Image (spheres, rainbow, N blue to C red):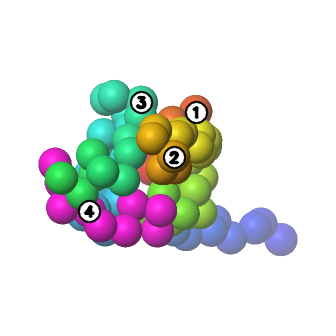
Amino acid sequence: MPRKARATRRITMSPQNTMVKDILCKKGVITPLNAQVNFGITRLAARIHELRKIGFLIDTVMKKINRKRYASYQLVATVQI
């Protein structure tokens, strides 16, 4: 008995996720301050989490300036969407 072909599931991304993905693909790095000031994205960690769930490999590098810590996100590998 032949197997039925599976319907491919299309992954949709929110506009902010698409924007973060594009920034990471072009520049390779994004910080929360950069995302908020330049693009109005206030919850960058949530957007990074959603991109990771889709399959993007993104590293988090903690940086420290004047006793203040912040995350810098670096794109390692992309997925085909």
Mark 2 vs mark 1: give the one in front: 2
Q: What are the residue bounds of the magenta stretch?
A: 38-46
Q: Look at mark 2 in the image and give the residue it sits on.
A: 67
Q: Residue at x 62, y 68 (%)?
A: 6
Callouts 3 and 1 close, C-beta under 8 Å:
no
Callouts 4 and 1 close, C-beta under 8 Å:
no
Dot 1 amino acid type:
Val
Callouts 4 and 2 close, C-beta under 8 Å:
no
Image coords of residue 73 (percent x, y)? 49, 43
74 is higher (above) or lower (below) than 12: above
Tell me the distance, in whole angstroms, between the alpha carbons under discs 2 and 3: 25 Å
Q: Look at mark 1 in the image and give the residue it sits on.
A: 76
16 is higher (above) or lower (below) than 81: below
Mark 4 vs mark 2: give the one in front: 2
Q: Look at mark 3 in the image and give the residue it sits on.
A: 28
Image coords of residue 69 (percent x, y)? 52, 49
Q: Look at mark 4 in the image and give the residue it sits on.
A: 41
**Label 4 crowding class (10 Å Cα cut-off): few <14, some 14-19, many 20+?**
some
Q: Secondary structure at mark 1?
A: strand
Dot 2 amino acid type:
Arg
Residue 60 visible in the displayed image:
yes
Going by the picture, which residue comes out furthest to the front?
66
Q: Quadrant of residue 27?
A: top left
Q: Secondary structure at mark 3?
A: loop
Tell me the distance, in whole angstroms, between the alpha carbons under discs 4 and 3: 17 Å
Q: Quadrant of residue 54?
A: bottom right
